Image: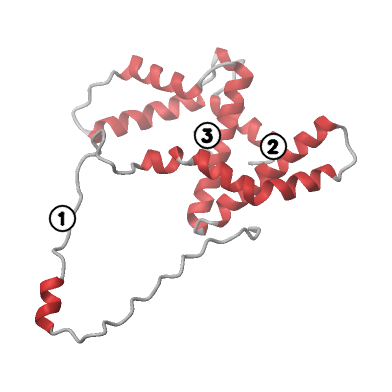
Amino acid sequence: MAQKNSSKSTPKLSAKPVKKAQPEKKAQTKKSVEERRPEPAEEHVHEHDEGCGCITAEEELFGKNGERSYALRDLWFEALNAAVEEQVAPEPNKREMLFLTLSNSIFDMMMDILPEELAVALAENLDDYLAVTLINKKYNIDLLKCFQEEFVGERGTNFDTEEELAEALAEFEDKFWNSARKDLGGKSPNQVIEAALKHYDLL
């Protein structure tokens, strides 16, 4: 990515109340309690094989976004739509206003639910992602795919250690992001990304 040298309140989720267990009517001896105590479950540690039933990180992060969208609809859509409908503007402008208002609310929520340090890292990565994606659209290229293909073409894929790979990536990364490219009109990726960030006041 580019080598760059007041949260709003949102609904908070609360835990469901836990129903307290009622005391046994008959006193239990220590022995009988020990006899009824279940064996500790074995720790479930393994690679996530197909059909194992575990939820992977990818499924947790992306697989539930459809359901999350419905939850957000039930939370926000009616109020946002009503607020936009009150505005005196052509219909296309209202749809744009709805999109911008919803996007802003989602970003606010994302930043608000994370600890500050993680929220800052998320914001920086999000800005870089938006800038690179805008550049890809403007110049009809895929910068990250270019990076990967050109790295493999120049350095290959065989490295004896992780340290060698990391060193090769660091050297190539500096060269790639700071070298002028024909497909970017003679500018470097960092130059066009910086321009995009400045255009949207994200630098």
Number of other residues with Cα within 10 Å of mark 1, as a class: few under 14, some 14 to 19, many 20 or more: few
> Which residue in the protein does label 2 denote?
200
Name the residue: 13% across, 85% down: 29
Q: Position of residue 23 (x, y in %)?
A: 30, 82
Number of other residues with Cα within 10 Å of mark 2, as a class: few under 14, some 14 to 19, many 20 or more: few
Place residue 158 in its image quadrant: top left
Q: Position of residue 128 (x, y in %)?
A: 55, 36
- Secondary structure found at label 3: loop
User: Would you say 30 lies left or right of 63 here?
Assistant: left
Name the residue: 32% across, 28% down: 168
> Which residue in the protein does label 3 denote?
2
- Secondary structure found at label 1: loop
User: Would you say 40 lies left or right of 125 here?
Assistant: left
Name the residue: 79% across, 47% down: 82
Q: Is residue 144 above or below residue 5?
A: above
Residue that extends furthest to the front in the rendered view of this protein = 25
- Which label is found at residue 42? 1
What is the CA distance from the residue labelled 1 to the residue labelled 3? 46 Å
Name the residue: 54% across, 19% down: 180
Looking at the rendered structure, the kind of residue marked 1 is: Glu
Question: Of marks 2 and 3, which one's residue comes earlier in the chain?
Answer: 3
Q: Position of residue 117 (x, y in %)?
A: 49, 56
User: Would you say 140 lies left or right of 97 here?
Assistant: left
What is the CA distance from the residue labelled 2 to the residue labelled 3? 15 Å
Residue that extends furthest to the bottom in the rendered view of this protein = 27
